[in-house]
Amino acid sequence: MLSIIIPAYNEEENIRKAAGVLSSLLTAGKIEYELIFVDDGSTDLTWQIISVLSVEEQGIKGVRFSRNFGKEGAIFAGLRRAGGDAAVVIDCDLQHPPELIPEMYRLWKTGGFEVVEAVKRGRGREGLFYKLFAKMFYKAMKAAPNMDLDRASDFKLLDRKVINSLLDIPERLTFFRALSSWVGFKRAQIEFDVRPREKGKSKWRFNALLKFALSNITSFTYFPMQLMTVTGIIFFFFALALGINTLIQYFTGISATGFTTVILLLLITGSLLMTGLGIIGYYISKIYEEIKFRPRFIITQETGFNENNEDI
């Protein structure tokens, strides 16, 4: 059986279409399936629609969070609840083309691949600023060993072995796209073009994207600390050259220029020290979040699951 995990946050306009398209596609492909919608603390009618669909159609299930825990928590909740031999993660707005699922299923079942990734051929209709931001983020992520996420997406098929490996990871602050690459396993790729949203608006805002990027960069790389180290080395040679120049001027009887140089040195040194302390503090704050060991999510309601499903 194939489990389809669909995170949803304020997607009342897309739930019914997503369920209809996926059900028709999988039924036509003669693939046994279950659709697991994970309501990430929506404030609209998302959960009510999921509940109705779970009664109307067999194979549609729902999980509801007590509040908004984020897409990462929704994905891992879906993986934990998935009963299939493999699972596909797909966006509720269908910007990920569901027509690729039968091919992903075929590669898994007959090709022996344990991870089938859908990678972006293009980034779709994104603004120039967003594209530059994404490029910088993925460039920073390349600092991690064997971690090239340049065209990666959350649209993946995972074998049960991969799912179990991901669920065994004890981290609280998770990044599914990177973790699913980090665990390894035999993998294949399929290219796709990102579609525009038919209904609704993207839930990502710049401050959320910035927080997401910083959290994931520091989760997988030491790039910010390495950057400060390189900057410190460059500044050391700059200071060394300035110090030699000052000594030469002193011994030749030429007085060094007044306070401008001193002020600049203090400003540069102070800014470097404060930036370095800020980066160290951010890493410490992540350690603090991890050692509290709070749950990734809290489930308040479920629908469509039978009595044999184990509790979370």
Image (tube, helix red, strand yellow):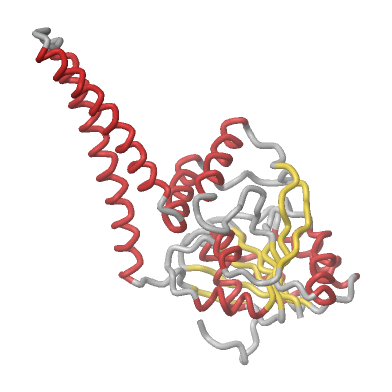
Query: Relative to the observer, which residue lies in front, 209 or 42?
Result: 209
> In x, y percent, where is residue 216?
47, 54
Q: Is residue 58 above or below residue 89?
A: below
Where is residue 21 drawn, in percent x and y?
81, 61
Q: What residue is drawn where x is 18% and y is 14%?
A: 260
- Taking depth in this image into account, of 163 and 7 the one nearest to the observer is 163
Task: Using the rendered view, name the quadrant where residue 159 is placed.
Answer: bottom right
Residue occupying image coordinates x 78% and y 51%: 192
Q: Quadrant of residue 274?
A: top left
Left or right: 162, with 95 as reference point? left
* The N terminus - image quarter: bottom right
In the current view of this chain or complex, which residue is farthest to the front? Answer: 252
Q: Residue at x 73, y 54 (%)?
A: 96
In the rendered view, tell whether residue 121 sits above or below residue 293. above
9 or 247, nearer to the observer? 247
Residue sitting farthest toward the top = 254
Query: Is residue 30 positioned above or below 43 on the image?
Result: below
